[in-house]
Image (cartoon, rainbow, N blue to C red):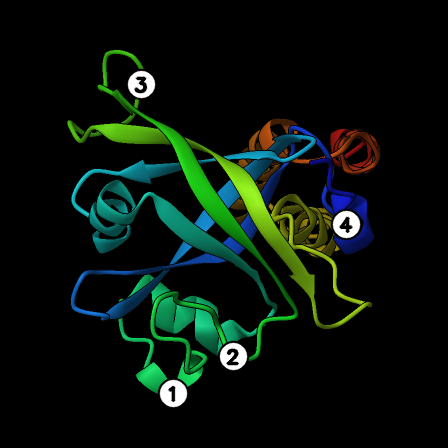
């Protein structure tokens, strides 16, 4: 089945920040802040490092939920593994965030382990590529748009641009380094419009 995820701002082969929720055999629910990539039609993919509760639950249940939300507390509490039970719906066999603006139930098709040799990273932890099929797609808030973190990098670089022009020395180097890092992220995860905006901003930095 084909899904029109553009209605929530999701486009093919781009990366979006979301809250992944899972459940284990004891009915214990878990949330984590992971990015996912829409592969087209009804296929999605995410990457999860070895050792997480989310990965363990997904390996056993072969299912997870992608929750689209902009709630800063949910992102933070999910990152530190302390999201309280009251944030979830009362469903007993699936973990869904009560106040998410939209969510997708994903059935897992394939779990592929990549070693640091296969997927260069700055530690020795294996990472798992998980591809799946959208089983259900529910929109609760028609105005919601999934969050792409490249936009945050663009905004930070825009704010820093005016400061970059009036400082020197180490502070100037700091702003330039932040620009380079944000540009790297945008090239990796963002759409062409954001990439073009970053290109224009970079040219502005280079004038000074």
Q: Are marks 1 and 2 in contact (CB under 8 Å)?
A: yes
Question: Depth-wise, is mark 4 or mark 3 nearer the camera?
Answer: 4
Residue located beneath label 1 in the image: 86
Res 77 → quadrant:
bottom left
- CA–CA distance in space, label 1 to label 2: 8 Å
- In the rendered image, the vertical position of residue 138 relative to residue 108, given as above or below: below
Earlier along the polypeptide chain: callout 1 or callout 3? 1
Are there few (<14), some (14-19), or many (20+) residues within 10 Å of tag 2? few
Are there few (<14), some (14-19), or many (20+) residues within 10 Å of tag 3? few
- In the rendered image, the vertical position of residue 119 relative to residue 150, given as above or below: above
| Residue 33 position within the rendered picture, expressed as x and y whole percent measured from the top left | 42, 57
- CA–CA distance in space, label 4 to label 3: 30 Å
Which structural element holds mark 4? Answer: loop
Which structural element holds mark 3? Answer: loop
Question: Depth-wise, is mark 3 or mark 2 nearer the camera?
Answer: 2
Residue located beneath label 3 in the image: 120
């Amino acid at each position: 089945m084909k899904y029109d995820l553009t209605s929530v701002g999701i486009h093919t082969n781009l990366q979006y920040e979301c809250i992944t929720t899972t459940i284990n055999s004891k009915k214990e629910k878990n949330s984590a802040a992971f990015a996912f990539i829409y592969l087209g039609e009804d296929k999605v993919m995410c990457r999860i490092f070895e050792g997480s509760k989310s990965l363990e639950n997904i390996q056993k249940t072969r299912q997870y939920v992608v929750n689209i939300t902009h709630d800063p507390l949910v992102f933070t509490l999910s990152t530190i593994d302390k999201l309280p039970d009251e944030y979830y719906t009362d469903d007993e066999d699936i973990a869904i965030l009560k106040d998410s603006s939209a969510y997708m139930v994903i059935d897992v098709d394939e779990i592929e382990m990549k070693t640091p040799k296969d997927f260069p990273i700055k530690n020795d932890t294996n990472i798992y590529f998980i591809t799946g099929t959208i089983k259900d797609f529910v929109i609760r808030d028609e105005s919601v748009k999934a969050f792409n973190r490249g936009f945050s990098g663009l905004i930070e670089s825009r704010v820093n641009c005016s400061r970059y022009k009036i400082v020197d020395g180490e502070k100037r180097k700091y702003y330039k380094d932040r620009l380079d890092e944000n540009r790297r992220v945008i090239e990796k995860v963002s759409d062409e419009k954001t990439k073009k905006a970053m290109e224009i901003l970079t040219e502005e930095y280079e004038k000074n």
